């Protein structure tokens, strides 16, 4: 009887199931399901088909021991069905997150909303200057945008960051807050945020300068 049972049981399937359970637990333990989910789903699908076949064979023998083995296979099938839902849903959520990220990234990449720096309510807004091309002096472009970001700076700020002008810049005569400077002139910046920086010249003049006209330097 024991020999008949041993011949009926497919030991290679038991070894395969043991490998699959160990591998799936390792994937969950190391939190690498997003990497190995195709392997787990493939092996699990194969395992379920094997288990269904083993249940049919063992039940047909009508031996109590083999019927108990069939019950174990049935429990294993239920567990593996849960795994399929678990790994499949994780993949769908990952794809959805990637789609949302790509949609937001593309929208932000093509959205043109210049930021501004404002001193109180009476000071003008400074939009983004145009990008600098190599060896070509950029031209700031002034626009009006009601949705611009606003940054408030204190007039008593410290100017500790040295920068050197890589292009000459002539301040807008209608805007008393801009600062004119010559190429090669060294100035000190309060804070390197945004596209317009509050700077101080060596003669004590303070004003706004376009960030793409200067570069960091060492004094």
Image (cartoon, rainbow, N blue to C red):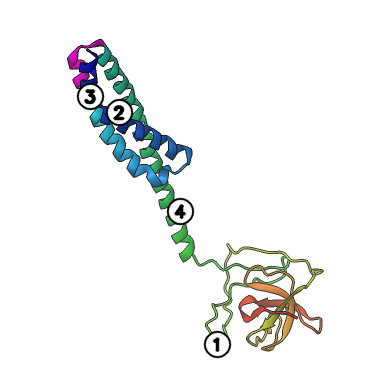
Q: Looking at the image, do the residues carrying marks 1 and 3 touch, with CB atoms under 8 Å apart?
A: no
**Would residue 7 appear left or right of 96 to someone viewing this image?**
left
Boundaries of the magenta span: 57-64
Work out whether 116 lies above or below 172: above
Which tag, 1 or 3, sits closer to the chain's start? 3
x and y percentages locating residue 8 in the rendered image: 21, 21
Q: Earlier in the sequence, mark 1 or mark 4?
A: 4
Residue 101 disc label: 4
Labels 2 & 4 near each other (Cβ < 8 A): no
Label 3 SS: helix
* Residue at the image point whose x is 78% and y is 73% from the top: 159
Residue depth check, mark 1 versus mark 2: number of the one nearer the observer: 2
- The quarter of the rendered structure image containing the N terminus is top left
As drawn, the label of residue 54 is: 3
Rounded to the nearest angstrom, the CA distance separating label 3 from label 4 is 45 Å
Circle 1 crowding by C-alpha within 10 Å: few under 14, some 14–19, many from 20: few
The disc placed on residue 14 is: 2
- Please tell me whether residue 190 is drawn above or below residue 96 in the rendered image: below
Say which mark, if any, is on residue 135: 1
Q: Which badge, 1 or 2, comes first in the chain's sequence? A: 2
């Amino acid at each position: 009887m024991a020999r008949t049972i041993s011949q009926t049981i497919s030991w290679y399937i038991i070894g395969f199931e043991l490998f699959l359970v160990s591998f799936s637990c390792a994937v969950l333990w190391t939190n690498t399901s997003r990497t190995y989910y195709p392997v787990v789903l493939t092996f699990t699908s194969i395992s379920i088909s094997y288990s269904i076949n083993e249940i049919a064979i063992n039940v047909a023998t009508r031996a109590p021991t083999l019927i108990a083995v069939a019950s174990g296979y049935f429990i294993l099938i239920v567990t593996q069905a849960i795994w399929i839902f678990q790994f499949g849903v994780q993949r769908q959520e990952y794809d959805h997150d990637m789609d949302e990220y790509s949609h937001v990234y593309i929208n932000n990449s093509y959205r043109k909303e210049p930021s501004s720096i404002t001193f109180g309510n009476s000071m003008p807004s400074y939009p983004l200057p145009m990008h600098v091309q190599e060896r070509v002096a950029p031209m700031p472009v002034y626009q009006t945008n009601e949705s611009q970001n606003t940054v408030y700076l204190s007039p008593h700020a410290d100017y500790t960051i040295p920068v050197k002008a890589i292009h000459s810049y002539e301040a807008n005569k209608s805007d008393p807050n801009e600062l004119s400077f010559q190429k090669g002139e060294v100035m000190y910046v309060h804070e390197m945020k945004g596209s317009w920086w509050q700077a101080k010249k060596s003669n004590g003049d303070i004003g706004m300068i376009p960030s793409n006209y200067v570069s960091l330097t060492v004094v």
